[in-house]
């Protein structure tokens, strides 16, 4: 199964991100990520066996995640896959530290694939026709987070669907 670690937005923020996705879609086309699937990927783990997935669930359920607040104040794009996203204009130290500490643990468990650079972002559009954010409102959102989720990704005809396998303890 294909797994990744992510933060899922609280409901009110999910709605705000959904509005941004709607505006962006009207202007830039492509495939809009459904509200329920909006997330911030902290670590893409990839294909793992069921046994390893169980080990990962146990690890996530015992994680002590330092909570924080992530400011989303800018647009960005990944040109090749045509991804339009929202994220931070300046690197967020706490988020980078959280990602690094999760990858340290994953590497200790034998997982590989840590990216050389981490750009925290929430993908709103895939295969967008246009990747410029001019004419779109500048995001000004705060994402309070405390819990990391282990998610399974299913590829379906109309895009990816995610299932939560485990969550770190609620505060
Ligand atoms: P994206 O939002 O930039 O597309 C689940 O598929 C999540 O993992 C997505 O959020 C996606 O990021 C990310 N992802 C998918 N495939 C990946 C890969 N091969 N390497 C790194 N991240 C990947």
Image (cartoon, grey):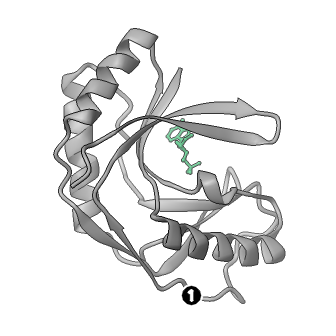
Residue at x 55%, y 67% (from the top left corner): 14
133 vs 144: above or below: below
Query: Would residue 111 be seen by someone viewing this image from the given angle?
Result: no
Q: Residue furthest front?
A: 170
Residue at x 45%, y 12% (from the top left corner): 50
* Image position, residue 84 (x, y; %): 65, 65
* Image position, residue 76 (x, y; %): 56, 70
Which residue is more in the foreground, 79 or 15?
15
Q: Is residue 146 left or right of residue 47?
A: left
* Image position, residue 122 (x, y; %): 53, 61
- SS for callout 1: loop
Which residue is more in the foreground, 92 or 143?
143
Residue at x 74%, y 78% (from the top left corner): 23
Q: Is residue 62 left or right of residue 41?
A: left
Looking at the image, in which quadrant does ligand 1 appear? Answer: top right
Query: Would residue 63 be seen by someone viewing this image from the given angle?
Result: yes
Which residue is more in the foreground, 78 or 10?
10
Which residue is more in the foreground, 97 or 32?
32
126 vs 129: above or below: above
Q: Is residue 40 left or right of residue 134?
A: left
* Image position, residue 70 (x, y; %): 34, 71
97 vs 139: above or below: above
Quadrant where the C terminus sits is bottom left
77 vs 166: above or below: below
Q: Is residue 62 left or right of residue 14?
A: left
Report which residue position mark 1 lands on.
138
How would you rate the neighbour count of disc 1 (Cα within 10 Å): few for under 14, some for 14-19, many for 20 or more?
A: some
């Amino acid at each position: 199964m294909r797994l990744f670690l992510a933060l899922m937005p609280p409901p009110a923020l999910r709605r705000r991100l959904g509005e941004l996705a709607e505006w962006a879609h009207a202007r830039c086309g492509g495939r809009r990520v459904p509200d329920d699937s909006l997330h911030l990927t902290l670590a893409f783990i990839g294909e793992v066996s069921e046994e390893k997935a169980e080990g990962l669930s146990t690890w996530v359920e015992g994680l002590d995640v330092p909570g924080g607040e992530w400011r989303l104040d800018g647009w960005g794009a990944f040109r090749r896959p045509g991804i339009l996203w929202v994220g931070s204009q300046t690197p967020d130290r706490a988020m980078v530290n959280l990602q690094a500490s999760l990858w340290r643990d994953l590497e200790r468990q034998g997982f590989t694939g840590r990216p050389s650079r981490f750009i925290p972002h929430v993908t709103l559009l895939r295969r967008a026709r246009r990747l410029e954010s001019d004419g779109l409102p500048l995001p000004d959102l705060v994402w309070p987070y405390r819990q990391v989720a282990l998610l399974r990704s299913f590829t379906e005809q109309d895009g990816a669907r995610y299932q939560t396998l485990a969550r770190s303890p609620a505060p």
